[in-house]
Image: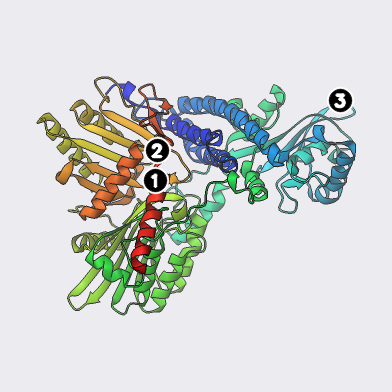
């Protein structure tokens, strides 16, 4: 396969994050919401450096020269390209930030510096600094007696270059992250005007070093590698939960991967900093905005009464497919139900789980948990079920990155209540979204199964687009039970008929269904592949898509984030369309479609088409058999493909461009909410009749 059909994974991800940043600069997005996109861009980039760049830097220091399998780039080449593109993105972020701050001024909100203050206001802030901030600061000077300190991940520090009276140079460092003082300091005489505490510290930093002359100064922030392999530190004599707790502590002290500076400093000092931190100088990036943008959420609090600056309020609606006054379990046993978040509420699923906890016929509840809300009603219900004498088996994946601590605490609560806990599989992460309720009825055991694309998290169900299938199909239920039995034995399923279950029964079956579409195309029959996922990096699947395109199969891909496949390459991928939707809600659902008409095979899944999902995790895709549910998912997919307001199309030169498909722009997420409101209203009218 020619390299022209491939894009590097890391550079594709940076393109995705740029699309997030573009929403911060999109004037059609309400002003206060654009602040959120700016902060998301930054937190996304932080995690990217902590995980992806951290991994690449570890590879750079290995004896073996590792090359990426699609573009052939070495780890060092990828890191260099990432840093170069990041500098460009940071310049773009600075322009957008200045634009946002300028638009906030007419709203009475300003982040200001000392140049814009009167002498009286400056004196007031100096008094504030002396009384409320300086006593809690711990200024340091680097020297033989005090070596370069450990800089905590993502915390703010003032860097000060000092001269002694004798002409010697010293380096001072002042930690600026402190729970005692506020990040945003309001100017007493100017309501709505703020100064960032780190800027106040930097302005008066000379008062902390009275015997020195300040020559240069800057705020700095280090980002550390956070990608830890639990297998490498596994201790068979320790409980797995204790291993994970040790890993979390270890993560905070891993090697730096990036240093951000708010101001320019001399090259000699940059080299010294790079040496102290163990990185090359190109890992030191000057940033034209505050180094931590989380304060924008406080600014939103000041604007909350100005509703025109925010999105219109939207509330998840009740599905018309269920009557909450009747047994959810009985209704699902009769007919499949699809819940579409955040447009529809997660409450019917919560109600079904609560009903199962109290139903005398229910003997068992099994569930896989990857990420849950901090105050999870789902956890409370599982605990209630166990206390009611039900068999409750919960697989808690402790390796859900950055949610490990929450999952450890949750597993203890469940265990204390009498639930049987499984801590994932040693070799594979369990990423599936699978829940099964077993009832002992007059006709024998009855399976009620839920299979979803997103986590069991009440909070994210209002923020992420996800699909959740509730089904009484007994064949699907039997296979779901087979998955749970394997997990309890520390094994994985080797063969399935209905479900697609990674690592052994998903990628191969997807490839086989693509082959079937290729056969149809070669016979002159209609052939189609439609995929909605978050990321596409699996080279086997990418190569099969290229092969299918060359065979004449029409292929539509909705890929929110990383897409390593280049569409529109003549003679190779010219039958492939790729779009990405970045909007108010995070696109998170996964849909697989193969074929057209009555022969179409349709699935919803927990798995993206990344090798880590298809071959290195336990993932589950559910077939959709119910005609009504099938039609609804087709409608969801086709509507998103038609989104030309938030959907951008990838071109053959790897750029993402706007498009105009009709006389008016279509925003798929707004369409789905309008439909949910209309359906709920129609149901209310029928109930009143």
Residue 340 in view:
yes
The residues bearing labels 1 and 3 have C-alpha atoms spaced at a distance of 68 Å
Few, some or many C-alpha atoms within 10 Å of disc 1 (few <14, some 14-19, many ≥20)? Answer: some
Return the mark for residue 666. 2
Return the mark for residue 167. 3
Q: Is residue 413 above or below residue 525?
A: below
Element type where label 3 sits in the image: loop
Return the mark for residue 631. none
Few, some or many C-alpha atoms within 10 Å of disc 3 (few <14, some 14-19, many ≥20)? Answer: few
- For this orientation, the residue located farthest to the left is 523
Image position, residue 529 (x, y; %): 23, 37
Say which of 622 and 469 sits in front.
469
Give whichever of discs 2 and 3 has the lower sequence position: 3
The residues bearing labels 2 and 3 have C-alpha atoms spaced at a distance of 66 Å
- From the image, which quarter does the C terminus lie in? bottom left
Task: Point out the frontmost of discs 2 and 3.
Answer: 2
In the displayed structure, does residue 116 sit left or right of residue 516?
Answer: right
Give whichever of discs 1 and 3 has the lower sequence position: 3
Instruction: Please name the residue shown 46% across and 24% down the image.
Output: 77
In the displayed structure, does residue 294 sit left or right of residue 161?
Answer: left
Tell me which corner region of the image, top left, top right, bottom left or bottom right, holds residue 7. Answer: top left
Image position, residue 610 (x, y; %): 34, 40
Element type where label 1 sits in the image: helix
Say which of 9 and 35 sits in front.
35
Image position, residue 408 (x, y; %): 49, 61
Whether label 1 touches label 2, CB < 8 Å: yes
Tell me which corner region of the image, top left, top right, bottom left or bottom right, holds residue 168. Answer: top right
């Amino acid at each position: 396969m020619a390299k022209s059909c491939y894009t590097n994974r890391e550079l594709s991800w940076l393109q995705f994050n740029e699309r997030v940043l573009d929403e911060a600069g999109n004037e059609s997005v309400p002003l206060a919401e654009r602040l959120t996109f700016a902060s998301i861009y930054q937190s996304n980039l932080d995690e990217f450096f902590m995980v992806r760049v951290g991994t690449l830097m570890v590879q750079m220091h290995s004896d073996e020269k590792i090359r990426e399998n699609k573009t052939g780039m070495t780890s060092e080449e990828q890191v260099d390209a990432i840093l170069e593109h990041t500098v460009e993105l940071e310049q773009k972020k600075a322009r957008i930030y200045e634009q946002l701050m300028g638009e906030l001024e007419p709203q009475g909100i300003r982040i200001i510096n000392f140049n814009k203050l009167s002498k009286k206001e400056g004196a007031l802030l100096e008094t504030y600094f002396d009384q409320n901030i300086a006593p809690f600061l711990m200024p340091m000077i680097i020297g033989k007696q005090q070596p370069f300190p450990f800089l905590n991940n993502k915390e703010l520090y003032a860097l000060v270059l000092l001269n002694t009276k004798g002409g010697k140079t010293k380096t001072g460092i002042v930690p600026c992250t402190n729970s005692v003082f506020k990040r945003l300091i309001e100017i007493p005489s100017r309501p709505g005007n703020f100064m960032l505490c780190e800027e106040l510290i930097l302005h008066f930093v000379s008062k902390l070093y009275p015997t020195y002359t300040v020559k240069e100064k800057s705020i700095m922030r280090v980002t550390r590698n956070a990608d830890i392999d639990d297998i490498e530190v596994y201790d068979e004599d320790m409980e797995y939960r204790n291993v994970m707790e040790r890993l979390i502590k270890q993560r905070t002290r891993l090697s730096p991967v990036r240093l951000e500076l708010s101001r320019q400093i001399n090259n000699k000092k940059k080299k010294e900093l790079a040496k102290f931190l163990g990185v090359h100088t190109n890992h030191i990036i000057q940033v034209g905005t505050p180094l931590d943008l989380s304060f924008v959420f406080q600014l939103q609090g000041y604007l909350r009464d100005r509703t025109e600056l925010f999105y219109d309020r939207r509330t998840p609606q009740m599905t018309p497919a269920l009557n909450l006054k009747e047994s959810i379990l009985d209704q699902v046993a009769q007919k499949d139900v699809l819940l579409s978040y955040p447009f529809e509420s997660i409450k019917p699923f919560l109600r079904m789980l609560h009903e199962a906890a109290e139903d005398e016929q229910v003997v068992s509840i099994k569930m896989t948990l990857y990420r849950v809300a901090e105050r999870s009603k789902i956890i409370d219900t599982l605990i209630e079920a166990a206390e009611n004498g039900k068999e409750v088996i919960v697989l808690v994946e402790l390796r859900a990155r950055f949610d490990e601590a929450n999952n450890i605490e949750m597993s203890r609560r469940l265990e204390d209540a009498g639930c049987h806990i499984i801590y994932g599989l040693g070799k594979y992460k369990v990423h599936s979204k699978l829940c099964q309720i077993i009832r002992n009825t007059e006709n024998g055991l009855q399976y009620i199964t839920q299979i979803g694309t997103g986590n069991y998290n009440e909070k994210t169900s209002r923020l992420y687009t996800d699909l959740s299938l509730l089904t009484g199909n007994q064949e699907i239920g039997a296979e779901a039970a087979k998955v749970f039995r394997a997990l309890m034995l520390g094994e994985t399923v080797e063969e399935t008929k209905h479900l697609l279950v990674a690592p052994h029964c998903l990628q191969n079956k997807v490839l086989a269904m693509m082959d079937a579409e290729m056969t149809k195309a070669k016979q002159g029959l209609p052939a189609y592949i439609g995929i909605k996922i978050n990321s596409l990096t699996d080279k086997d699947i990418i190569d099969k898509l290229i092969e299918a395109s060359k065979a004449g199969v029409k292929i539509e891909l909705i890929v929110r984030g990383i897409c390593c496949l280049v569409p529109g390459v003549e003679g190779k991928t010219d039958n492939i369309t790729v779009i990405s939707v970045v909007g108010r809600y995070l696109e998170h659902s996964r849909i697989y479609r193969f074929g057209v008409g009555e022969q179409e095979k349709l699935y919803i899944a927990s798995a993206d088409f990344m090798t880590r999902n298809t071959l290195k995790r336990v993932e589950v895709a559910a077939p959709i058999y119910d005609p009504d549910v099938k039609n609804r998912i087709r409608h969801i997919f086709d509507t998103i493909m038609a989104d030309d307001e938030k959907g951008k199309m990838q071109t053959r030169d790897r750029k993402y461009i706007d498009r105009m498909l009709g006389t008016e722009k279509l925003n798929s997420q707004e369409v789905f909410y309008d439909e949910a409101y209309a359906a709920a209203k129609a149901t209310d009218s029928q109930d009143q009749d």
